[in-house]
């Protein structure tokens, strides 16, 4: 007589050996059999978040999906210069958004609900930098008028994205951030790293908790649904570790804490908000099944094979499209070819966090 237990009729994906250890790495699929909602080629998809979010937008565009671009370069600007000035990387030219409170404040700033006290950095050469997009404009802005016009256009593009999207895909990247002591404004980088001046009397390190992350995202979702009731939200967690930590801990421990907070927060948000869904790209890239093969030699960058695995599952589970049906999906380039070198160059340009390593690595400076 066979004894029946709650485990007797569970599907294969409930068992480690059947769904992880017993499969080739490229066949592991941790996506739920019945995702909360679908994404179709006609859906307007707005993307934002950390560096890894750029891969999602890239694949969607090259696969015929509608990855929105609401902030475009002037037609006379070459494609190369447009990329240099961060047009087309995300839906609007907001750069990387690493912590959820940055996202919440972006919404409030775009709708005139929050005006940070420290709203412009004047550099030694007289150029102006946006503290919340410090690397968006190489060389900075020449005049305050130019700065203000660009900011107005940017906020209009952000509002259009929020109001017209069908699906918002946000990749949570970090919990560590630098904030203004005056009003709590969150900077994407520590002031003084690539612009501005660090002042311990005005700037403070903050490591966001699970409760803060959940609260900030819950507030953002409410605000988004206030201007766009139909919006569906997909959350992912970036598998890219911290490049440096100001927590006082080893960067490996700090990374584990940060990603654990974000993953737990996503689970809580999915359980409490009906139009929010978590997509397990983090697990696909860093799970034991991959045996580290999806990471480059620096143990941070994600190889194209890993991104392709994530996106195969994304299209299959959310769009009902098998890999063979994805018309012009990117093919992993051969190592060392021109496409790989170009991708490395682009990643260096658009990942704000790289500035921390670039600034201090040559002098052995310890980030504190």
Image (spheres, rainbow, N blue to C red):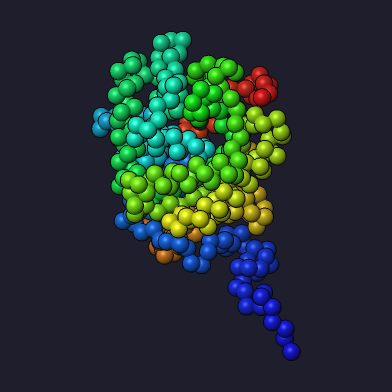
Query: In the figure, residue 130 lies in which quadrant?
Result: top left
Report the residue at 36% width, 29% height from top.
Answer: 81
Q: Quadrant of the N terminus?
A: bottom right
Q: Quadrant of the C terminus?
A: top right
Report the residue at 45% width, 58% height from top.
Answer: 274
Q: Is residue 227 visible?
A: yes
Q: Nearer the viewer, residue 41 or 171?
A: 171
Label count reads: 0
71 horizontally vs 136: left or right: left
Residue 357: % across, % down: 60, 27
Report the residue at 69% width, 82% height from top.
Answer: 4
Say if 162 sits above or below 77 in the image.
Answer: below
Residue 16: % across, % down: 67, 65
Residue 34: % across, % down: 48, 67
Say if 152 sits above or below 225 in the image.
Answer: above
Q: Nearer the viewer, residue 365 or 6?
A: 6
Residue 283: % across, % down: 59, 54
């Amino acid at each position: 007589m066979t004894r029946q237990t709650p485990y007797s009729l569970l599907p294969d994906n409930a068992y480690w050996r059947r769904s992880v250890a017993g499969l080739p790495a490229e066949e592991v699929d941790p996506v739920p059999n019945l995702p909360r909602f679908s994404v179709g080629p006609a859906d307007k998809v707005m993307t934002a978040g950390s560096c890894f979010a750029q891969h999602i937008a890239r694949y969607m565009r090259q696969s015929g999906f509608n990855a929105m671009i609401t902030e475009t370069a002037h037609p006379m600007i070459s494609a190369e210069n447009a990329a240099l000035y961060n047009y087309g990387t995300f839906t609007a030219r907001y750069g990387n958004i690493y912590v959820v409170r940055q996202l919440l404040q972006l919404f409030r700033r775009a709708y005139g609900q929050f005006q940070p006290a420290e709203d412009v950095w004047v550099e030694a050469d007289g150029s102006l930098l946006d503290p919340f997009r410090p690397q968006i404009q190489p060389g900075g802005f020449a005049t305050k008028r130019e700065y203000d016009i660009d900011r107005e256009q940017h906020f209009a593009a952000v509002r259009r994205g929020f109001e017209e999207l069908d699906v918002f895909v946000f990749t949570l990247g970090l919990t560590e951030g630098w904030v203004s002591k005056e009003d709590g404004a969150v900077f994407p980088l520590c002031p003084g790293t690539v612009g501005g001046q660090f002042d311990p009397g005005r700037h403070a390190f903050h490591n966001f908790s699970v409760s803060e992350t959940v609260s900030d995202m819950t507030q953002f979702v409410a605000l988004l649904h206030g201007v766009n009731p139909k919006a569906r939200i997909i959350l992912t967690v970036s598998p890219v570790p911290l490049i440096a930590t100001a927590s006082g801990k080893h960067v490996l421990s700090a990374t584990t804490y940060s990603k654990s907070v974000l993953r737990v927060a996503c689970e809580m948000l999915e359980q409490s908000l009906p139009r929010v869904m978590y997509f397990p790209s983090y697990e696909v890239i860093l799970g034991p099944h991959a045996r580290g093969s999806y990471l480059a030699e620096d143990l941070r960058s994600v190889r194209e094979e890993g991104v392709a695995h994530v996106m195969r599952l994304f299209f299959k589970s959310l769009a009902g499209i098998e890999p063979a049906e994805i018309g012009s999906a990117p093919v992993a380039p051969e190592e060392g070819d021109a496409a790989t070198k170009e991708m490395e160059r682009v990643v260096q340009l658009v990942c704000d966090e790289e500035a921390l390593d670039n600034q201090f690595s040559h002098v052995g400076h310890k980030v504190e």
